[in-house]
Every structure is written in C-alpha cells, then in structure tokens.
Image (spheres, grey):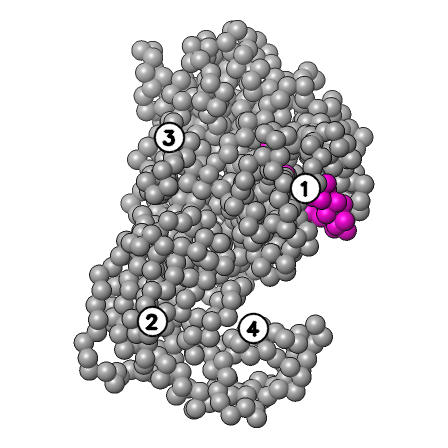
Amino acid sequence: MPDVTFTVDGKKLTAPAGMLLIDACRKAGIEIPAFCYYPGLSLQAACRMCVVRQEKVPKLQTACTTTVAEGQVFTTESPEIAQARKATIELLLGNHPLDCPVCDAGGECELQDMTFKYGAGESLYVEAKQHREEQKWSPAVYFDRPRCILCYRCVRMCGEGMDVWALGIQNRGVSSTITPNGGDHLDCEQCGMCIDACPVGALTSDTYRYKTRPWEMNHVSTVCTHCGDGCKVTLGVRQVNDGTEIIRGDNRDKSGINGDFLCAKGRFGFDFVESKDRLTKPLVRNTQGKLEPATWEHAIRVVANKFKEIRDSQGGSSIGVIGSNTTTNEENYLLQKFARTVLSTNSIDHVRSTDYAAFSRALAGHEHRAASLRDTESAKAILLIGGNPTEEHPLLAWNLRTNFRHNQARIYIATDSPIKLERQARQALLLPLEGYEAFTAFLHGDDAALEATAEAKSFREAIDAEESLLVVFGEEYRGDAVNALVQWGLRKPGITFACLGDYANSRGAADMGIYPDLLPGYVPFTSPGAFAEEYTGMPADAGLDAVSMLEAAGDGKLAALFVVGADPVATYGVDPASLKNTFVVVQDIFLTETAALADVILPSASLYEKTGTVTNSYGDVQLVKKAADKAGVKPDFEILVRLTGAMGHDVKKLVPFGKTNGVSADMGQSRGAQSGEADRHAVWLSAHGLEPRLSPFDPFAVLDEIERLVPSYQLDRLNLFGGNDVASRPDFVPVSGIAAATARDLILPAHEGLFTSGVLGEHTAALLELNQYQSSTSGELAPAVAD
C-alpha cells in the first residue's frame, strides 16, 4: 500500500496506508500501552488501554483497531487519556491479588508497569477480593485465575497461532474465566506459548514458578539444542555451587529466526543439563575391567598414548571416528581435521539422518535455489513432501500456519499418511506407503508411476501453475531420488528447495565434512584443492563409513574407535561383543550404550555450555553462546585440542591461533564504564576478521579457517556476531569435484516427536513427564520412551 502522512502528538509520521495506529506508533518509538493487543493475532479491543484521541472523532478510539490514513491527527498522551487508562487499571485491580512480591511475572508484568505509570494507587472497592485456588492444567502449565485480566491473548495464541484451540472462555461478564478444553486439564501440544503471551502472572510454567526473580538471572541468547529448526532460545541462568543453573527458557524479545515461537522442547527441555546422570568426571577402565574416575590429565594421556601407538604401529586406517549431530560447526570441523591430520585416517562418519550430500550435489552450481527458514514465512506457494512438521519441525509448522493466516499462502501437501497441516492446505494428496519416488516421476509427467486419478492430476496441475514454489522435503528422499526431485524443480526459475534433518546440527555435521569421502563443503578427498596444503599428512586412501567401521571392529580389523556425541551401538544395533578387541573412547554427556563399553570416557559439555556456531536444516548459520556451566566437564573443542597436544602434534597446525591480525588484544581493561562500547567494538572486529586469536581453545579461530576454505560458508559476519541468522550457500559447492553418490543407504531418520530428543530427551525430566502426560490423555506413547 502507498505511504500516508499523519500526525501523532505533534510529530509527522509516515506509514503504509491501512497499518494499525499502534504498530505505526511503536515503529516510530511512540509507545501506546495495550494488554489485549498482540502482533500477529486477531484484534480483540477488550482491554481499552490503548485509547487515543483522534481529531474530529467524538469518542476516544482504540489504537489497536484504528488504521492510519492521510492527514489524520492523533493524541496519545493527555490528562483525558491518562484518566481513562487509570480507570481501566482500577477496574482490573478490583479483583487482582496484591501478590507482586511472589508472582512469577513480578518485574516483567505489563499490568505492574502500567500501574506504576498511571497511578491507581488507591482502590475504590471495599468488597473482599474473590480468591480462587491455583489450577494445574498440565505438568507444564499452571493457571492462577484471580490474576487473569481477560485479555484473551492465550485463547488466540493457542487457537490462531497453534491451531490447537485448547483454551476458551466460560461464562459471561464478571464471571468470565479462561477454561481448558479438557475441563480441568489441557489436551494440547504443551508448547507454553500461552505462558509467554500472558501479560500478567496468570499463566506460569512448572519449570520456573516460585524459583527466582528475573533480576536474579543472567539472560543468554543461544540456539536450541534439540531439533533441526534452529530456534533461538533465551536462557535465564543463575549461579549455583557447581557452576550455573538454567531456570527458564523463552524468547520473549522475538529477536531470533523463530520470532516469539518455541515448542515444548525449546521452552522446557533444558533440565538435562542438571541431570543426576550427567558424566562429570573422566572414567578409565582398570585392569579388572571396571570404569573408575580419573583426572583429566591421566585420561587424556591414556587416550593420546594409545591412539599414537596404534597409528604408528598399525596405521591410521585402523582407527575410526564417529562424530555428532549436536556439536558445533567448529567442533565438527576440528574433529574431521583431527582425524585426517593427527590420527591419519579418513574413516570418519556420523549418524546421517538426512542425505545432505546428495542435496548439495543436486544444487551445486545452481544459484539461489536453496531456501532459508525465513522463506517459509513469506513464500506464496509451498509444496511439502513427506514428514510431519507439527511433530518433527514445529517452527516450520508455525511458519506455514502463520504464512497461511497472514498472506493466504497456497500450501500443497503430499504425504503417505494424514498430517495436521492439511487443515491449512489448498490441496493434499495421499500417496501410497513410501511412494515418494513414484510421486517424483509423476511430477515429471509419468502418469504410470502413480495412480493418475483426477485428484492427483489436479494436484500436479496446481503445482505446475505456480510461478514460484518452495519445495520442502526430508529423509524420504535420498541419493538419486533427491537429484530427481531437484532436477524437476530446476526446470522452472522460481522453484527453491529445503531439505529437513533431525537434530540441532545435522546439517552442520554434513557441511563440515564428517564423511569418509568428503571434506568440508562436500569437497571430495580425491580432489582436495586448498585443503591439500592445510591438511598435511592427510591419507590418500578412502575411509570407512560408520557401519563399515563397526563391521571392521567385529572382524578384528579396527584397533581403535573414537566416538564423539553419538551412540552407534544403540543406533545400529551393534553386538557389544564385536567391540571387545577395539580400544573405544567415548566423548559424551551421558553414559550411553556405547559409553558403557568404552575403555575411556571423557565428559563433554552440552550445546548450552559452549560457544560456536550451528547450522539448521535450511543452511542458516547462527551463533551459539555459553549459558550454563557444569563443573568437571569440558567442551569437545578443548578436549580435541588437548588430545592433539598430548600426541605431540603441533597444535597450531590444527587451530590457527596466535595471530593478532595487527591489533592489540583487549584483556578486559576496557570492561568498566565503557563495557557496552567495548562489546560493540568486539562485534565489529569479529565481523571484519580483525579480532586477535590468542588461544588454541578459541572456536572462532577455526571459524576463520572454515570461511577461508569452505566456499559455501562465506558468511555475513557482522550479522552473525550481531546475533542474527546468516544463510550459507550450498550452491557454492564446486561443480568440478562433485563426488558420486554412496552405494550404501546410510540414512537413519530419527523421527523425534514433540517430547523426544534422542539421548537428551531420555535425560530431560520435563520432557519425560510431558510425554507420560500426553500418553495418559491420548493413549499413545512416543517411541523413544515406549521402548
């Protein structure tokens, strides 16, 4: 719409015609208070706090329903308006309990803020307040009815935003109350979005209630450690005896790729950090065959000496390395470089949940064909093939619903089982079980590949008629099937693709070269290019994949196995006896089935306890910041560096540190009154590659090398270090060196649900409780717990 000019409090403002006055004012820095208004949800106009005076209009108008037009004149602050707002607050406080000192919203309460601003220090009511007992709606959500101001944000968030409709209003007038769909309990997805939307303390979470105050916590923005969407989460942490404790997870500042959205795993799934099952001391197997605690120095020495002995006597090919889907990009890159240059082996792999290698091969050389997660919010047409985003990729599902509500996006769904998102779909096609390759052939025009019903033909015609289309697919496609689908889309210029993976850094593990035949950036080890000079001592022979390593161990041909953040014994169903003659080292957070068989266990830090970057399923790179701290554990990055040094290898060849780049280091001298300025300077220096790298434990020294050697990771560092997401470029994979597809199908999708998250989910009490609760209300139990 064209811009219009209007006046607010004597200031000339410009905004698109039809924009809500409250949005236009907030954009210009003029704050208009509101309780019921919430961006992105339908208009309610229930609280009357946002009233303003509009010239030539007899009554006060609500800014949340008034749209701007040319020449309008508004007043947002005057004695008349202040008195109206004060009267509204007096009504709200009439039955509101005066329990601010113990209320979880104290210090963050919008009602509290408005009371301080507009007065209402005395009440005109003498009647006793109507007290109601607090209600437990679910293991995650509690409701305190007297605190509720009936803004209906929670009802709209649950209904419009989540498409669950688990909350409603019961009774009328002063007897109105918010009521869950189960009568006395919630039957929903337990996302907790209603809690964050609540402007007061009526809705609270079990993980945070009555535990601390907002000003007693440090608030750290990092990336969720669970699924592949890469949501930003703000963790509230406080100091405890053995480090720091995470008290709360939210994203109320809406600053991340996910806006204000978080699912149950992002909001409640952090207590694994404090699990009693955490590994906090290195364990070394003694001569009696039992694991016993050891010092870090002793454990590192045992591992380094054994690895060095095996490498020198039997060759690096007798050592295998299995990496992780949840460690940072820098740690993944360092792990494969450690394997190739220190251990002299190309036998490195990870548990592959999606065929990102095939996806990159298919897109190589084709610019602007890879979609970011943000594209799902604005794409005019979206084709979803397979999967169930509501369960496996909640942020994607949120974006698709929001895009449908706000932009009337045309959503097409082709799956072999019905899914919830079909409610928003323009057309949905039910495929035969695992009929995805046949569906691709059908898109290519082969009517014989799929039963060419009138419905199927109509679906294909609708897809072909779209000038721009975002195609989202997942593990259902792998190898040649990925290439066939992408080749279909490359026929038209307006088609982009997104490939979905399971875990927080599954994409990053693939991008960073955790493959036996591919270097970082999917560069074949047979044509290493710039890596040849950097990776001195890299073997020329092809390595083994994860399954082949385990088979070789069973045949007595693998002398050592180094497992970092994975559980291959459980994942691949390995017979424990097959590893009895292999020296096994496990670096992990918990005592997994693989760790229980290890000769040495090194306790590592979780993603919430380290710094670096991760890449979500869509190739969006984000900064991870250290939020928590646990005594006794070390980041995977530091452990690898210490192993390198203990093996007698030049650490500077592994981590390019010690370079000051011509500037002096800030050792904290400026962290006083000018700390804010110093922090801004640090962002600028990092963004321009000028920050000194003085420590071998600095992950950003490795990020510098990644940017230098990996073409697809030419990142906008200013945005990245400013806390934003930055897209990688999979189309920058060098076409001249594209490797052939792997003959063996090694893709093992996890299909994690809303309350499961692999090993982390098994040790997260909040998710286990929610999963049990959902089973009692729906009669179904998620597989990861049912087993």
Label 1: element kind: helix
Residue indicated by mark 4: 23
Residue indicated by mark 3: 786
Span of residues in magenta: 457-475
First reached walking from the N terminus: tag 4 or tag 3: 4
Label 3: element kind: helix
Please rate how many residues cluster around mark 4, counting C-alpha atoms within 10 Å: few if below 14, some from 14 to 19, many from 20.
some
First reached walking from the N terminus: tag 4 or tag 2: 4
Q: Is residue 302 magenta?
A: no
Q: Are circles 4 and 2 on residues that touch, CB within 8 Å?
A: no
Please rate how many residues cluster around mark 1, counting C-alpha atoms within 10 Å: few if below 14, some from 14 to 19, many from 20.
some
Residue under the image location 49 percent in, 80 percent down: 62
First reached walking from the N terminus: tag 2 or tag 1: 2
- Residue 481 in percent (x, y) is at 69, 29
Residue under the image location 21 percent in, 74 percent down: 129
Q: Which amino acid type corresponds to the residue marked 2 in the rendered image?
A: Arg
Query: Which quadrant of the view contains residue 433?
Result: top right
